[in-house]
Every structure is written in C-alpha cells, then in structure tokens.
Amino acid sequence: MKSLLLATIIALSAFSPSLVTAQGTFAYDQQSSDESNPGAGFNFIQNVQPTGQSFTPSLNAIGFVRFNLFDWVRNNGIGATILVNLRSDSITGPIIDSTAPVALPDNLGPNGFVDFFFSSNVPLQPGTKYYLQPVVLSGDQWGIIDDRFNYPGGELYANGTASTSDYWFREGVIVPEPSIVALVLVGAGILGYIRRR
C-alpha cells in the first residue's frame, strides 16, 4: 500500500507539472470603485502622459492592479501592449517596479477590466502615497476610464497635474493557494499517520 501511494505521488509530481503551480486569490486593498460602477469619463493614455493614479496602501505590498481600459480606434486589427509602472514620490518619481506587459485585443471595452501583474508582491510602506502609471508600449489610441469616485487616498494625474477625479482602479496582493500536489502530500502524510496508529 505504501509503495502504491508513493508511486502515485511521484507520478503526480513528475507528469502533472501544471498541478504544481498553485492559483492565488486576489486580496483587494485600495480601489476607487468596483465593477458595479465602471465610471463615465475617460482620458487617452498616450495624450496625457505623465498620467496615472496615486493611492495610499494599507497593506505592505502590491501584486496586481486592475484598470478599466478601452480601444478607441476600433475594427482596425490593432490592439495595444500596455504595462503599469509603480512609482514613488510623484507621478514622475523613481520607478519601483513595473508589471508584465499585457497584449490587449482590438475592440476591447467599453468596460475592459484588465489585470496587470507584478512578477511578485512588491513591498510597500503602508500609509505612504504611491503612483500607478499605465504606459502604452505599442498600439493605437487607448482610453482609460475615470470619474469623480471620491477615492480618499489619492487622485488622478493627467499631464503631470493632479485632478479632482480618479481613474477606475483596484489594487492589492495575490495570496497563494496550496497546489494540488501539496494537498496530496499532506493528505498522504495524514493517511500514513492514521494507518500507522
């Protein structure tokens, strides 16, 4: 019985690498709104640089940010590749880290809620203001949704100047979940302990 259980665990580990990668869950920290209120105004990302949203985290890290984006020039077969810079001190301050670029399809949006991920959770100082700057690396004209969301921990920046509006955003950390293989190993250990007793 022991050898069969061990063989099963080894087979799962060796032949199912996709099972080893655990999914994570989003733990939201700051947001100007949620998907039930997507906003009504907009800016063109390329036209108002430096642009972005400041926020004041209560958590000590950030792992992702979500913006509401849309393709302005539709049906031309051109999407966009966009990333988000995390800056300190100001909208033009030092870049702490950047998300992985995301390739977006032609005709995305309206209400194109897009997640941008940092390679790992980036350490932050709770209570300190930081700046999220979306950047179009390639593609045609892309819009980002804003509104008077009255987010108390920051503001929208367009052409480097603070506004009374906010970009639609949500940010937080990714909390890892245990992988299937890890759960199988724990279960096998418990089973082995019970059988031994």
Image (cartoon, grey):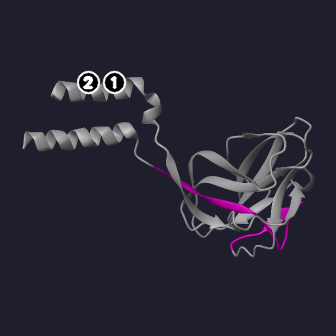
- For residue 160, say whether it is visible: no
Single out the residue that lies furthest toward the left: 197
Label 1 Cα crowd, 10 Å radius (few <14 / some 14-19 / many 20+): few
Q: Where does the magenta region start and end?
A: 153-176
Number of numbered tags placed on the structure image: 2
Q: Please determine whether, in this image, residue 43 is positioned above or below residue 78.
A: below
Q: Please determine whether, in this image, residue 49 is positioned above or below residue 82.
A: below
Is 138 displayed left or right of 172 in the figure?
A: right
- For residue 10, say whether it is visible: yes
Residue visible at 72% across and 73% down in the picture: 151
Residue visible at 18% across and 24% down in the picture: 3
Label 1 – label 2 distance at C-alpha? 6 Å
Q: Which residue is mark 1?
A: 11
Q: Main secondary structure of the magenta part?
A: strand
Query: Which quarter shows the N terminus?
Result: top left
Residue visible at 68% across and 72% down in the picture: 153
Q: Which residue is mark 2?
A: 7
Residue 190: x and y in percent read 20, 44
Q: Is residue 130 magenta?
A: no
The amino acid type of the residue labelled 1 equals: Ala
Residue visible at 92% across and 45% down in the picture: 73
Q: Nearer the viewer, residue 90 or 154?
A: 154
